[in-house]
Image: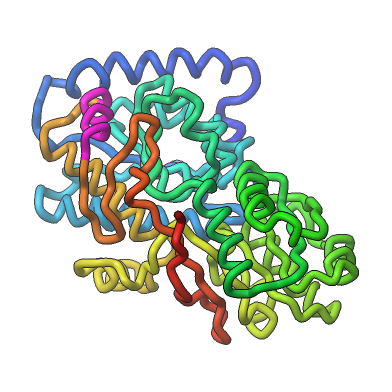
Amino acid sequence: MRQSLARVLSGVAAVGLIAGAAACNKSSSNDKDTAGGSSSKCGYSLAYFGALTGSAANLGVNIEQGFELAVDQYNTKNGANCVTVKKFDSQGSEQVAPGVARSLVTDKKILGIVGPPFSGESQAADPIFDAAGIPSITPSATNVTLSTKGWKTFHRAVANDSSQGPAAGAYIKNVLKPQKVFVADDQSSYGQGLAAGVKTALGSAVVQTDKTEGDGKQTDFTPLVQKVVSSGATVLFYGGYYTNAGVIRKQLTSAGWKGTLVGGDGMKDEGLAKAAGNAAAVGTIVTCPCAPADKAGGTFVTDYQTKWKVAAGTYSDVAYDAANIFLGGIDAGNTTTDKLNTYLSTANYTGIANTYKFTAEGELDPSLLKVWAFKFDAAGSPQADQEIKTS
């Protein structure tokens, strides 16, 4: 499952490369324009960094396609290949991400990064991007601690888990109204943070907790299933991704459990229903710090369908906006990484999914946060259920 890219920069060589690569990028992109000193808005690159293959690739592909659509439309107006798309496949893995990140920062023309999508890979790759001075906007990594590391290039275009966790807890409490809730997570940075917020929100209603392996490493969840059934819980909240969650839902159904599975945005993918079976997945609730992609403004929904021959997925619209924030900065003449990073600190951009203004820590302004609940239907798709108030 791990591709050869993970081995390109390994061992002792990788240790020496991070400093050298960062210095190389800073000297060429941060302090001056590209070769020739041109102030043209063309001749630069934006990068997508995240999963294109691996166990949770669907979520990454959604994001990359939204990003790439924005760049394509910019190039239609400004000339073919004006801004070049660069893709870096991390497989969503915090083990693979550092080597891929070191490769990215050697490219002197990359001015900004859309990604990483996942919290674990963000913990591993963002220090490398920060050392190189390349600004990034994650459309989906929600772990709270990402904005507490002192990284000057980090920006988050959605609410973090301090909003999503309590919102999920509020939905469980006020809509599902169970007497007993079981909470489990996959031990990832994302899953643990989200589960912690839910446990705090629900308090004594949480009767038991458990852990699973993550990243597709576990296929038999019998121990968890048995604990959930015996606990008497009618709701299971799972902090993890759709790959595990679909199998868990299938095995819970086989065990006769008729309760409701609830999770976060990492489970908001049709892959959950494919793993569980559509009938078993029906009624599963997932929260997301995002609005329904099919409600995005402008012509985005039609444009995305036309280009990719599929409907926009989770965070496709947010990634589209993130790319356009970068492109707006480049269009205004911010053609070094330093200038573009400064531009992000003052940007106030109204996109097709939301309005974006970043705090000094790179978080989305608190007034702009949103969390929605989605419910899986009989066709195996998560459909918008309701917006959940975050305060």
Q: Nearer the viewer, residue 119 or 183?
A: 183
Q: Position of residue 28 (x, y in %)?
A: 27, 18
Q: Please indicate, yes or no, whether residue 240 appears anywhere in the rendered image.
A: no
Coordinates of residue 290 in the picture (x, y in percent): 41, 60
Secondary structure mostly taken by the magenta-highlighted segment of the chain:
helix
Span colored in magenta: 337-347
Q: Position of residue 176 (x, y in %)?
A: 63, 74
Magenta span has 335?
Answer: no
Left/right placement of residue 287 relative to residue 72 reads right
Colour approach in the figure: rainbow
Classify the position of the C terminus by image quarter. bottom left
| Residue 352, image quadrant | bottom left
Give the residue at x 30% y 32%. Answer: 110
Image location of residue 31, percent across then percent down: 23, 16
Residue at 81%, 78% (x, y): give it.
257
- In this rendered view, identify the residue nearer to me: 353 or 28: 353
Task: Look at 53% across and 46% down and name the residue there.
Answer: 162
Residue drawn at point x = 17 percent, y = 22 percent: 33
